[in-house]
Image (cartoon, helix red, strand yellow):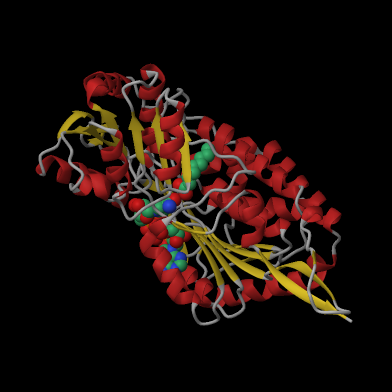
Amino acid sequence: MTDLIPLLPDVEAFLEGPLSLRIGGGKIDTAGSIEVTDPSFGTPLCTVAKAGAAEVDLAVAAAAEAYEGPWSSMTPDERSQRIWRLAELVDQRAEIFGQLDALDNGKPFAVARDVDAAYSARHLRYFAGWPSKIEGATIPVSVPDRFNYTRIEPVGVCGLIAPWNYPLLMAVWKIAPALAAGNAIVMKPAEQTPLSALYLADLALEAGLPEGVLNVIPGIGTEAGAALAGHPGVGKIGFTGSTATGRRIVEASMGNLKKVSLELGGKAANIVFADADLEKAVAGAFWALFGNNGQSCTAGARLYVQRPVYDKVVEGLAELAAGVSVGPGMAEAAHDLGPVISERQMQTVTGYIDSGLSEGAECIAGGGRVGAAGYFVAPTILIGVTDTMRAAREEIFGPVLCVLPFDDEAEVIARANDTDYGLAAGLWTQDVTRARVLAERLKAGTIWINCWGETDAASPFGGMKQSGYGREMGADAIALYSQTKSVWVV
Ligand SMILES: NC(=O)C1=CN([C@@H]2O[C@H](COP(=O)(O)OP(=O)(O)OC[C@H]3O[C@@H](n4cnc5c(N)ncnc54)[C@H](OP(=O)(O)O)[C@@H]3O)[C@@H](O)[C@H]2O)C=CC1
Ligand SMILES: CCCCCC/C=C/C(=O)O
């Protein structure tokens, strides 16, 4: 029997509910509900309200009212102060957020608190600085006796759709710039992980955001998500999730031609050259995939290793895999990884392992489910993989690393780019010229050189090709949630 961290009284009270929709500053109950599962045990965790199309209408109306009313009439400084205050509250309640994400996502509590919650607070703080810096320009037009300038204005109501892999952080990646640009929000968290977003909506009121500025409506993607994406009152959708769902969102958005930004799937190539600092490269490549249990769009899923160091790298990876500990999100004992998100995801992931093995790959670590309770998959390393195998081409989104040897630079660039995705790529080398050339030639929105997974609220993040479009974070994220107006004066 695993000892579990006791629930904080605030978390117990929150889970007792009602876990209603947060709309217009109020709590709205619904006829239907979502049963949320604890993936660490595969048991029921709680029941939350489920938004349908009618509740999406309500939430969009509440957001529109808040946008037209108190939110737009605040000065940039007043908006800044409220976003900053929200950041402070996220920091102060990091333990609560940590427990909520550990419970419904399964990630280790310490990670949820020290990474997800801490980065979320930092993200909000960065964007809290923006409202007073969103500047238009005076334009040197060649029309005599005319003055032309631009205003950067909010879109209005933004629909934000989040995934389950970083429940709080992915929500905040969108909420923070959308608020900073002056928009009102309807956020739909993933059905598996609605808790931290609901709690954030309560904190937003405490931080002084006017009622209706941040509405949070748990619901099913094909119902509430689709209704939001198709809603004529929504001017912009910010989405993170699968490429397949991204396509559906674009289709649904066409009715009113709303702006859309998409942060989608990936199958990142991570390249270890023979001249790399191997100790760093092996550990870096290991956690590039196994961090967050492989459930990251940026996971370094295709590890290309130059042939002279291939055996040594494989040996190092296997040693690291043998030392990894897995456990329930709320386990008292420190551990590295939790379960995958759901029984369906566990089947998907183990299915990819089986498909790799049936196509001729060899498993040198892990290989399938761990235990009979909860959705645990052992960290799995496949060698003998070829570029054409399904496990090497498709996004697995779980703890499965494919290791592939290569000979020279031109070959590995071509193989790394031979994918429909283009979110991230990385390389390990001590040759600066090679690093510069690969940074140019790899077709991905983020390139990591001698590191992996670094992100910062100030640095743009997003994909090329079918990994999506639009850049979250930094000045680019403000542009995603703004529109430019040109004003002519006589
Ligand atoms: N890029 C990334 O970070 C992510 C990639 N994925 C990939 O997607 C695979 C499947 O995971 P899944 O959770 O189904 O991912 P989805 O892309 O379907 O889910 C992401 C979000 O989109 C919502 N959604 C689903 N269908 C629609 C729709 N038609 N219109 C609007 N919103 C919708 C979901 O709602 P709900 O879940 O409530 O139904 C969820 O909030 C994973 O195995 C992984 O490969 C998944 C998550 C994140
Ligand atoms: C601690 C920061 C992790 C950010 C990882 C980025 C992944 C995004 C995604 O999976 O959507």
Which residue sits at x=51%, y=48%? 167
Residue 441: image x %, image y %? 40, 44
Residue 133: image x %, image y %? 79, 53
Which residue sits at x=40%, y=28%? 428
Q: Which residue is nearer to you in this view: 378 or 252?
A: 252
374 vs 324: above or below: below
183 vs 330: above or below: below
Residue 234: image x %, image y %? 60, 74
Which residue sits at x=40%, y=57%? 465
Toward which corner of the image does residue 387 lie, by quadrant?
top left
Q: Which residue is nearer to you in this view: 144 or 243?
A: 144
Q: Which residue is nearer to you in this view: 332 or 481?
A: 481
Q: State left or right for residue 195 relative to residue 155.
A: left
Q: Which residue is nearer to you in this view: 324 or 40?
A: 324
Residue 17: image x %, image y %? 59, 54
Q: State left or right for residue 462 relative to residue 363.
A: right
Q: State left or right for residue 206 relative to residue 391.
A: right
